[in-house]
Image (spheres, rainbow, N blue to C red):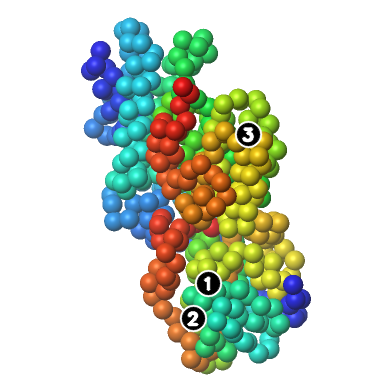
Amino acid sequence: MAAAAPTETRVFTLDPHQLAPQRETLEQALGYRGRSVPEAVSLLLDDLLASVPPLLQPSCAFCVPPGRLTTTASSIVCSAVEFHTEPIITKRLRKSTAVALFVATIGPRLERWSKELTSSDMLRAFVLDAIASVMVEAVAEWVESAVASEAATRGWRVTNRYSPGYCGWTVADQPKLFSFFPKRVCGISLTSSCLMVPIKSVSGIIGLGPDVKREEYECSLCDLADCFRRREGPARP
Amino acid sequence: MNEILEALARCVERGKVNAKSPYPPDLKGQDGADELARKALEAGVSPKDVLTKGLVDAMRRVGVRFRNKEIFVPDVLMSAKAMSAAMEHLKPHFLSSSLKRRGKVVMGTVAGDLHDIGKKIVSMMIEGAGWEVIDLGTDVPPDRFLKAMDEHPGCVVGLSALLTTTMLNMEKTVKEIKRLSPDTKVIIGGAPVTPDFAAQIGADAYSPDPQGAVEYLNSHCLAQ
C-alpha cells in the first residue's frame, strides 16, 4: 500500500446537544417508515434519548490531500494512493478537483451500553443501537457541512459523501483512507477485518471542485442488483 | 383449553409480557403470557401444547408478519420477550426431558466481526420456533464452532457476517465445518450475504430474514 503524503487534518469535538436528529429519522431507524410507532416503543425511545447525551463523545475529522487527482473507470488516485471506489462512486467523483477524506464517531460508550443490554433486554439494546446509528450519521452530516464550508472558501462545491462498503467500494480500502490521518484519529482504530472500532463510526470521501454536484442520494445512484441497502433500507454503521 | 392457548398466543403476538405490563393498552390489566402459560399448565394443558400451540404458532405468525414488513424489529422483540416469560414455565419440563426441543442450533458471528444484534434477533426467533440455541457470540473463529459441534452432536450451525471482509472468514468457517463434518447443515446470513455467495462457499442455506432460517430448520433439519 502506498504511503499517504502528510496532510493537514482538521479535528472537531462536538457538543452532544448539537446532535438533535428528527424524531422521524429515529423512528425510521427502528423500521417504522411512515407507520405509527407503538406507544411502548415511543415511550422507550423518549426514555433512552434522555439518557443518551452524557454517553456521546462525538468527534470528527477531515483532510484534503494535496496533489493532482486522477481517476480510472473504477478507481481514484489521490496523493499516490489508489482507492478502488468502483464505477458507481468513481463516476460521481470524476469531475472533482480534489477530495476530502473524513471520519466521524460518537465514541464507544453508547455501543458498550447497548452491548451490555443484549443479554438482559434486547428491545432496549436494539433501540439504543438505532439511536447510536442515527447519532453517528448526524456527526457525519456535521463533518460534511464543515467540508462544504471549507470548499466554499475556495469557490468549490461538493459531491455527496461515499463510504467504503457501499455502492461497490470495498471496505478493504479502509486502511488506505485511514493512512491519511494520524493514528487513532478521533479515537477510531481499525481491526484486521477493516471494521472501525468504535463500530458507531463513519468514514468516507467527498469530491470537491467547481464542476461537481450533489445528487439525490439513496439507490437511484446505484445499479447493484443485490445490494443490502436496497434490500433493507439504509444500513447501520 | 383452546381458549387459554389462544389467549396465550395472542399475548405473544401482541407482546403482552405479564399482567403488570401496561402494553398493549387494550390489554392493560389483563393476564399476559407469563400468567397464561402458568395457568394453562395448572389447568392440565400439556407442556407440548403450551409450547407448540401457544408459543411456536404465535412466533411463526410474528416471523411471517415481520418478513412481510407488517411489523418491525421492536414489535418482534416485544413478542420474543412475552414468549420468554412463558417459556420460563416450560423450563422444568425441558430439564426433565418430558418436553423436547426440535434440535440444536449453534449460532455465531464469524471471526473478525463484532456485530451482534442481527444474529441475536435471528436466535430469538429460532428459539421461538422450538429449537435450542447455543449462541457463541461475536468474533468466533472456526475452531470454536467445531468445538461446539463436538459438544452438541447433530446440531445445525448458523453463521452471521456484516462485512464483506469477514465474509471471507465465513467462507473459511463453512469449508472447515464441511471438511470435518460434511453432513452438518450450515445456514448463513447478514447484510452483505447473498444466495449466490452461500452456494459458492458450500453453505446449505441462506436466509435474508429470521423466518427464512426457521422455515429452513423446520423443513430440512428436523431429526428423523
SS label for mark 1? strand
Q: In this view, does B153 lie to the left or right of A121?
A: right
Q: Which mark is residue A162?
A: 1
Residue topped by disc 2: A92
Which residue is at the front of the view, A17 or B169? Answer: B169
Q: Which amino acid does label 3 sit on?
A: Ser
Q: State the quadrant of the N terminus of chain B.
A: top left
Q: Nearer the viewer, residue B115 or A89?
A: A89
Q: In the image, which disc is placed on residue B181?
A: 3
How many angstroms separate mark 3 from mark 2 (CA)? Answer: 47 Å
Q: Mark 3 lies on which chain?
A: B
**Label 1, residues with CA under 10 Å away: few <14, some 14-19, many ≥20:** many
Residue A54 % position (x, y): 57, 52
Is there a contact, CB below 8 Å, between mark 2 and mark 1? yes
Q: Which amino acid does label 2 sit on?
A: Arg
Residue at 36% x, 32% y: name it.
B59
